Image (spheres, rainbow, N blue to C red):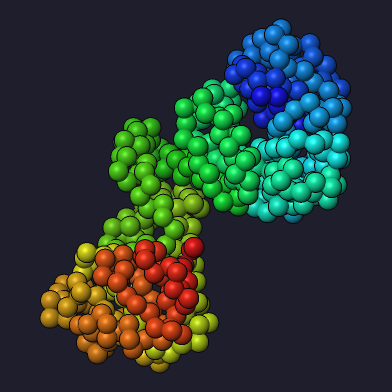
Amino acid sequence: MNISIFGLGYVGCVGMGCLAAKGHNVVGVDVSEEKIRLINDGKPTIVEKDIDVLIENAHRQGMAKATNDYVSAVMETDISFLCVGTPSAPNGHLNLDYIMQTAREIGEALRRKNTFHVVVIRSTVFPGTNAKVSSLIEELSGKKRNVDFAVVSNPEFLREGTAVKDYLNPPLTVLGSESEEAIGILKRLYETSGAPIEVVDIKVAEMIKYVNNSYHALKVVFGNEIGRICKALNIDSHEVMRLFCMDRQLNISPYYFMPGFAYGGSCLPKDLKGLKTLAHDLYLDTPVLNAIDESNQVHLQSVISYIENAGKRKIGVLGLSFKSGTDDMRNSPVVNVIEHFHGKGYEIRIYDRNVSISRLMGKNKSIIAEKLPHLNVMLQDNLEDVTNWAELLVISNKDEAFKTIQPKNGQLVYDLARVSGIENYEGYNGLCW
């Protein structure tokens, strides 16, 4: 394919070298005369493992060149990659000036072009940028989006030091666009990568890079806080984290990564509190660990706020234990929600087939005696009775029985667990979706 790359910095230079290595003809566009000269001399614009060889080979084979003539670059290519910088503005937002300027240039160039052109946003941008770029190009070009041109969001996942390897061996390729034709072209471009190609909503494609990098930052800080605690105790932190990373069922896995209700149960709150206390006793500051419970409480409060704002007084709660398939109510977050609204005079009825007043014992019994002394009045034996009675249903766990509920017209459903099969109901609202 014939490809133009706007921006010959880190992402653009790596993209140029790797695309040329895969047999594509690439022209780079930049305002820097120095970067243009380097590429046209067969030299990279960055220092990065293996990129010098790729650029030299591409130059020697006549498959890579650079220019500041954006019109000719667009006219002689079918795909334009936007790889320009999106630096942070003083207020924390991204500076999209370079992105929008490049969009203007492409829009102006497309006025002269009569074939379909694909614009690919590789730069890290806020959700909604694809739509803004599409509108600007459409306005300036006089062309119709998704007919004469299309914009695809295709975030990059490159690490400095291993960028070439990452480009040629990606974990996945993410594509978001309104145009099936453009998606088909990009699929053909990436078909030799050997990685899954995920076609998603445009805003999902725009959001994922922020989620990735924020989590990577969290991992670094979490590991360092654990390291400080281990060092104070004369424990090998690398050995601890080696074991931590061996667990692919829970620790390094999709488990716990599904947005939903607050955590509870006996283990997570207790052990987190224990580790925080240990750090405190060692005179160590661990702000990430300290913030976990606070964030959990903020999430819990968002549920309370939603129910209050719904303006309904008859609340049906489906699920009392902290997860389905158990009667464990220790630190069950929904117990705190029920306690709050019972204290405010709301009418509450509860269904949980795993919880029985007659079987309560030990910690479960003491929790109910302290927080929900009137549970015997609230707890119902029949799911249908609760769903028919309530003005607002709150689903707190993934009990299979909750998939069968049939909400009434005008009834609200607030799903904290994302129970499948009920999301199309008119009164449905998900906690995080």
226 to the left or right of 366? right
* Quadrant in which residue 273 is drawn: bottom left
Q: Nearer the viewer, residue 266 or 207?
A: 207
Relative image position of residue 397 (x, y in whole percent):
32, 67
Relative image position of residue 349 (x, y in whole percent):
31, 85
* Quadrant in which residue 33 is drawn: top right
So how many labels did they put on this image? 0
Identify the residue at image location x=24%, y=75%. Answer: 352
Identify the residue at image location x=34%, y=77%. Answer: 406
Identify the residue at image location x=64%, y=11%. Answer: 53
Residue 55 at least partly seen: yes
202 to the left or right of 255? right
Identify the residue at image location x=41%, y=55%. Answer: 258
* Quadrant in which residue 262 is drawn: bottom left
Residue 379 at least partly seen: no
Relative image position of residue 338 (x, y in whole percent):
36, 80
* As drawn, 433 above or below 385: above
Q: Quadrant of the N terminus?
A: top right
* As drawn, 241 above or below 264: above
304 to the left or right of 52? left
Q: Nearer the viewer, residue 28 or 211?
A: 28
192 to the left or right of 384? right
Q: Nearer the viewer, residue 239 or 56?
A: 56
Q: Nearer the viewer, residue 9 or 410?
A: 410
* As drawn, 367 above or below 229: below
Relative image position of residue 87 (x, y in whole percent):
73, 42
